[in-house]
Image (cartoon, grey):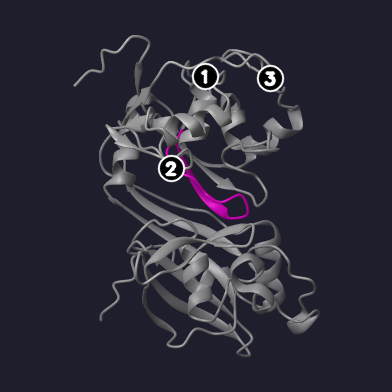
Amino acid sequence: MQDTKPGVQTLTVDAADDGIRLDRWFGRHLPDCGRGQIEKLCRTGQVRVDGKRVKAGDRVATGQVVRVPPYAPRVEGYVPPNAPVRKITDAEAAALLACVIHKDADVLVLNKPAGLAVQGGSGTDTHVDAMLDVLRFGLDERPRLVHRLDKDTTGVLVLARTRAAAQALTAAFRERRTQKLYWAIVAGVPQPMQGRISAPLGKVKFGAVEKVAVDEDEGKVAVTDFRVIDVVRKRAAWVAMMPRTGRTHQLRAHMAHIGTPILGDGKYGGRAAFLPEAADGVTKIKQLHLHARAIVIAHPSGGVLRVSAPLSGHIAATFADLGFEESMGRDEPMFDLDY
């Protein structure tokens, strides 16, 4: 039912905004509404999504309808929607173009490097979302994000080249008509070496730090299949993981939960996520070793798209240092685990 109160707007979430926080959605589309005002409007129930009360940190999904009440536009710090953004340097553009590992009329796939955020945030002005114009390849439309990877995770990142493709791909992710394969190096060796982790996850505050953790009472269902591919003297293992659900930081939380945190993941594994300095020929491993290796997804024009991303950067270096051979891994993200 349409809201007819004077000054009220009802806006529909676009595919490019699928999964982002509500306050960031406001920042993109209603940048003259200050953060404090957003939180107050949510707290008092004036902002609603699909008719339901929400918090500023809740995430929105494609097709949802946001009720925006009248508000007082801020003046200080206001950035008009069409204001020029920071100029992308030639080096940044070239680096992003070098990440493209698949291109067709509907879809682009990047092999995202570590350290490159997918979307902006506080203090982050260099991210994929801000550089999408570099990836037009002659089209009038700007590519659209249809899913995300953490800043420190490398590998497969799918982009839609058109609005229609974005709608189709977003629906495929939402309806779980996708299969994703991740590779990680973990500290220790999972026991058993193949299996399924079924542990509900919820957000928990540890002092000033918020992260997800196993919560049997209020957590959301989270399921991960895994298989150990290779081991280095019981100190570290190369693990393939296939998430059956898509919870925030699911793989990181699940691997830490079974006692083998992803290498370099101090947030979830603490000291246990780091090998002793110089152990096994690898020194000072501090970066996250999680790689989105492959994806199988319904293609917007029909059929199935299968893309694999080769290892690069610090993960490729650590594989070499530990003696793991990339050719031993299976690119097909189908485990066919028999339980």
Q: Which residue is tagged 2?
A: 58
Q: Which residue is at the far front?
A: 44
Residue type for callout 3:
Gly
Residue type for callout 1:
Gly
Q: Which residue is tagged 1?
A: 138
Where's residue 299, x and y in %? 31, 40
Q: Which callout, 1 or 3, points at the residue further toward the start of the chain?
A: 3
Q: Which callout, 1 or 2, points at the residue further toward the start of the chain?
A: 2
Residue 152 falls within the magenta-colored stretch: yes
Give the residues drawn in magenta, as a range: 145-160
Where's residue 97, x and y in %? 62, 35
Residue 181 higher or lower than 16, as above or below? below
Residue, x 36% and y 72% (percent of image)?
216
Residue type for callout 2:
Asp
Local secondary structure at mark 2: loop
Q: The C terminus lies in which quarter of the figure?
A: bottom left
**Nearer to us: label 1 or label 3:** 3
Please state if 156 lies on the left or on the right of 68 as rendered. right
Local secondary structure at mark 3: loop
213 or 263: nearer the viewer: 213
For label 2, count other residues whose C-alpha is less than 10 Å away and answer few (under 14), some (14-19) or many (20+). few
From this viewpoint, is residue 259 visible? yes
Q: Which residue is tagged 3?
A: 77
234 or 38: nearer the viewer: 38
Mark 1 → mark 2, Cα distance in angstroms: 36 Å
Mark 3 → mark 2, Cα distance in angstroms: 24 Å
